Image (tube, rainbow, N blue to C red):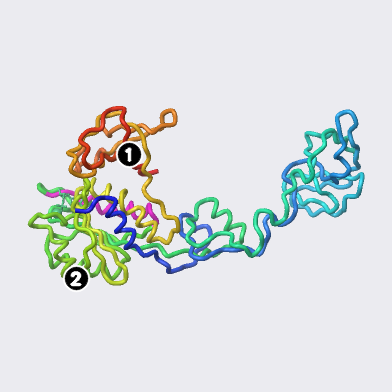
Amino acid sequence: MLSVTEVEKIILDLVKPLTDKEFIPLPQATNRILADNISSNFDFPYDDNSAMDGYAVKFQDVFMASEDSPVSLNIVEEIPAGYCPQKTILSGETARIFTGAILPLGADTIVIQENTQSEGCQVDIFTPPLKNDFVRYKGSFYRAGDFLLSSGSKLNPPEMAILATAQCLQVPVVRSPIIAILSTGDELITPDESMVKGKIIDSNQYLLASFIQQNGGIPLPLGIIADNPLFLENVIANALNKADWVISTGGVSVGDYDYVDEVLRKLGGKFHVKGVKMKPGKPLTIATFDQDKLYFGIPGNPVSTMVTCWRFLQTAMEKLSGKKNYRYPSIVKGITRNHLRSQGNRENYVWGNVKVVEGYYQFTLAQGSHNSGNLVNLQNINALAIIPQGTNLIEIGDDVDILLVNH
Ligand code: AMP
Ligand code: MG
């Protein structure tokens, strides 16, 4: 059976980033992935401007200024932000200037107002500036025509601000991946059905839909499929037609009613993963179909589903979405505040919370039963502690690897 890191690599090698492009209005572009390189016809800053409130001067006029012998200049103009200077500064002259305002011709340096004293049309400079102090030069942040943002960037707040500045009102983004989800099992009912003894509510469908949305995908929920190979075949064939990927839960173990592998084989799937040495999540199946379609068959226990999403699918979805520099799971080093036990035969993920204490991560187990069928105590967790294969016990205060989730 494959290790967790082997499976991670197999998945990432299989994932082909989407390249289809669509244009969407700028206000809707947050969290999307840019599909083209973006440039602007403008230099940034557009003009030489002032970084401070003060006085625009010729350095030559003021470099000798001191407390004992201040330099006195004539104020010939006031230049607020948004205003175009009308005058050229001559020797002995200055302009009152404010942050962001265009530097007038003739001036090369800003003296901050804290180092001056003004009266009427005169200002005294007490402290000599350095040459070019507080001037932001045209094009010093960016030159017109260069790449401003590169394709594959995720559009977070800074990138949104940059797009606005570039007047990119219709943003080319990679289309969002469509991921079909289905739940297999004769025992499953939907949340709006009345409870019947022996049945359980299909929670995985909601878990997966939410996870896919959180990661920029469009879930395509296909409902509950009974443990019947013919039904399964129909639904999976249909799902493969409609979606980029298909994720099913349940039916991939070795039980008599576990039909997913058989159906995938019948539909011509190529198997890449059949089990992973991890707990929970061991019976993971991964197969591919034509046109780079991936099928993930995840075991049905809700915690197995969640841990599989966090450990493998998050990074895989980032890559699928076209994000360059997709992120690997954030695994940090910390110490545990509980004994962490494992049978030692698989890499074991246990759930809980981390907080940073004096700069170090500290992990605490979630209260309640640590059972892969128990989704209740997954609520509000932010970390999974990883007990390596071959380790039976990590003692209180010992180092542990911690996978950060929901962060
Ligand atoms: P399976 O992987 O089909 O053997 O299912 C393992 C366990 O997960 C069983 O106890 C199922 O009842 C439970 N389970 C399977 N599918 C779901 C689902 N969609 N929602 C909640 N629990 C499920
Ligand atoms: Mg089942």
Q: Nearer the viewer, mark 2 or mark 1?
A: 1
For this rendering, which residue is in front, 391 or 226? 391
In what element is the residue under mark 2? loop
Left or right: where 74 falls relative to 3? right
Task: Indicate whether 291 appears above or below 58.
Answer: below
- Which SS type dominates the magenta stretch? helix
Q: Amino acid at mark 2?
A: Leu
Magenta-colored span: 199-216
Which residue is pictured at 85% across the width and 39% down the height? 63
Q: From the image, which quarter does the C terminus lie in?
A: top left
Neighbours of disc 2 within 10 Å: few (<14), some (14-19), many (20+): some
Q: Residue visible at 79% across and 44% down? A: 131
For this rendering, which residue is in front, 213 or 260? 260
Q: Position of residue 155 (x, y in %)?
A: 50, 55
Q: Position of residue 222 (x, y in %)?
A: 25, 62
Magenta stretch encompasses residue 212: yes
Residue 267's disc number = 2
| Total labels drawn | 2
Q: Secondary structure at mark 1?
A: strand
Between residue 114 and residue 402, name the one nearer to us.
402
Q: Residues within 10 Å of mark 1 (few under 14, many from 20)?
A: some
Would you say residue 368 is visible in this rendering?
no
Going 57% across and 53% down the picture, which residue do you hit? Answer: 161
Residue 357 seen from this side: yes
The amino acid type found where label 1 is placed reads Asp
Q: Position of residue 186 (x, y in %)?
A: 12, 56
- Residue, disc 1: 401
